[in-house]
């Protein structure tokens, strides 16, 4: 069941935050707050939140712990919270 996270997250057709449409080639990134795919303008807004730094540090820790037991592609899952990616 965990193999599908990448497909589900990376090929989301709309931003979870603002519902903007995301095409296969549009960049998206995972929220450190709810781990849902969001568009880059939403990510920039997220980064301005006062608790972003604390939450993102926590997300890295949680993500690495989760990945170790649950995901086969730890780099991808963790990095997708901090580096924009496309559906490919
Ligand atoms: Zn958005």
Image (cartoon, rainbow, N blue to C red):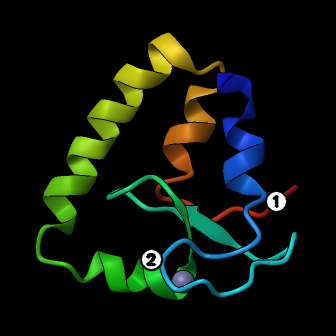
Return the residue at label 1. Answer: 87
Q: Are marks 1 and 2 in contact (CB under 8 Å)?
A: no
Question: What quarter of the picture does the N terminus occupy?
Answer: top right
Of residues 62 and 16, the one nearer the viewer is: 16
Can you give x and y, in whole percent of width and height, for residue 77 in the image? 57, 39
Q: Secondary structure at mark 1?
A: loop
Return the residue at label 2. Answer: 43
Position of residue 50 relative to residue 57, above or below, is below
Question: What quarter of the picture does the C terminus occupy?
Answer: bottom right
Position of residue 25 relative to residue 18, above or below, is above
Give the residue at x 39% y 27%.
64
Residue 63 lies in what quarter of the image? top left
Total number of numbered discs in the rendering: 2
Q: In the image, ligand 1 is in what quadrant? A: bottom right
Give the residue at x 65% y 87%.
20
Can you give x and y, in whole percent of width and height, for residue 83 in the image? 56, 60
Give the residue at x 84% y 77%.
23
Residue 14 lies in what quarter of the image? bottom right
Q: Is residue 33 left or right of residue 31?
A: left
Q: CA distance from mark 1 to mark 2?
A: 17 Å
């Amino acid at each position: 069941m965990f193999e599908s996270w990448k497909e589900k997250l990376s090929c989301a057709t709309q931003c979870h935050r603002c519902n903007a449409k995301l095409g296969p080639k549009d960049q998206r990134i995972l929220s450190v707050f709810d781990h849902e795919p969001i568009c880059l303008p939403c990510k920039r807004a997220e980064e301005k939140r006062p608790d972003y730094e604390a939450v993102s540090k926590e997300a890295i820790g949680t993500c690495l712990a989760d990945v170790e037991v649950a995901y086969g592609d730890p780099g991808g899952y963790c990095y997708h919270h901090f580096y924009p990616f496309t559906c490919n």
